[in-house]
Amino acid sequence: MAAKDGDGWAECARGHRHWGVHGASGLLAVHHDERGTARVLMQERAVWSHHGGTWGLPGGARDSHEDAVAGALREAHEEATVDGAKLDVTGVYLDDHGGWTFETVIAEAAELLDVVPANAESSDLRWLTLDEIPELKLHPGFAETWGEVQLALSPATLVLDMANIVGARAEHGWWKDRAGANAKLLREVAGRSFRHPILARWHPKVVAVVEGAARTATAPDRVTVAQAVHSGDDTIVEVVRQAKPWETVLVITADRGLRERVTGLGAAVSGPRWLLDQL
């Protein structure tokens, strides 16, 4: 296990040669402005490189000790001076060629980060709108998956009706210690990925709405706890209402009245079993 031990050619089940003995990953950094317009950081590959002169994502071979996220952030820093601390990873898209994989790491940037070509692998770097990207000469691997990947770029929030979910879980004695039952669920949710129709790993922002005796439950990393002063349903509706029109919101609840209220605001809904089956 050593730095750059992933460098080298591999052949996939399709009979194609790819760079990256252990597979490869790339960083899809995206920024949404106040109007919801998305801009993606694109890299023009140096003419001497594999598929030189085409546009794609900063990225490259993963080392044996790296996962997709670590590899993509390292490569983006080496090639484009991207500061990974200024990005929030929201998902990973898996392109499996059979025996070789490329993983696209999607990460939201709060601003258009200053970037410059940092080594000889990049000829140019630009933040481009989704309409501008098809006008470029695209890297064939990027072009093959871009139509699907771009459908998963919107910022996403998972809103948890904690009282409803804890009740549906029905663990022995949960009603005697509602705060403890909520805290346990929060710990299990924190930092994990969730199912997504397109992404292999989905990392939405998580907002957990707690009420009554459970309001003492504290928030672990990557989870925001919203304490309902009065009605938990009203608090959930307000969380949904505050989302931007271009953001994706999924509410987890079995409450029929609440489901009608949030779907009326444009949110999607799933029942508690969607979440509990993944824990």
Image (cartoon, rainbow, N blue to C red):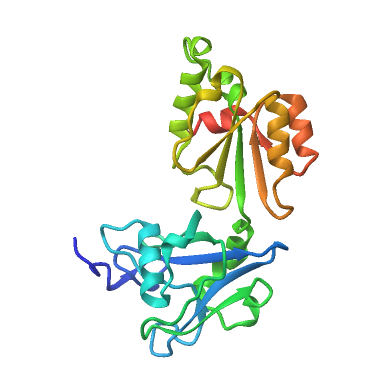
Q: Is residue 180 above or below residue 258?
A: above
Q: How many marks?
A: 0
Q: Is residue 121 above or below residue 213?
A: below
List the single residue furthest toward the right. Answer: 264
Residue 13, picture quadrant: bottom left
User: x, y percentage for residue 64?
Assistant: 26, 60
Whether residue 203 is visible here, answered yes or no, is yes
At a point 78% along the width and 32% down the height, the residue shown is: 260
Q: In this view, does 59 lie above or below 49?
A: above
Residue 277 shown left or right of residue 69 in the figure: right
User: x, y percentage for residue 244?
Assistant: 71, 52
At a point 56% along the width and 70% down the height, the residue shown is: 112
List the single residue furthest toward the bottom. Answer: 47
Residue 85, picture quadrant: bottom left
Viewer-side residue, 9 vs 55: 55
Q: In this view, does 118 lie above or below 261?
A: below
Whether residue 15 is visible here, answered yes or no, is no
At a point 64% along the width and 27% down the height, the residue shown is: 228
Q: In which quarter of the image is the N terminus?
A: bottom left
User: x, y percentage for residue 95?
Assistant: 47, 61
At a point 31% along the width and 58% down the height, the residue shown is: 66
Viewer-side residue, 185 vs 223: 223
User: x, y percentage for residue 52?
Assistant: 44, 86
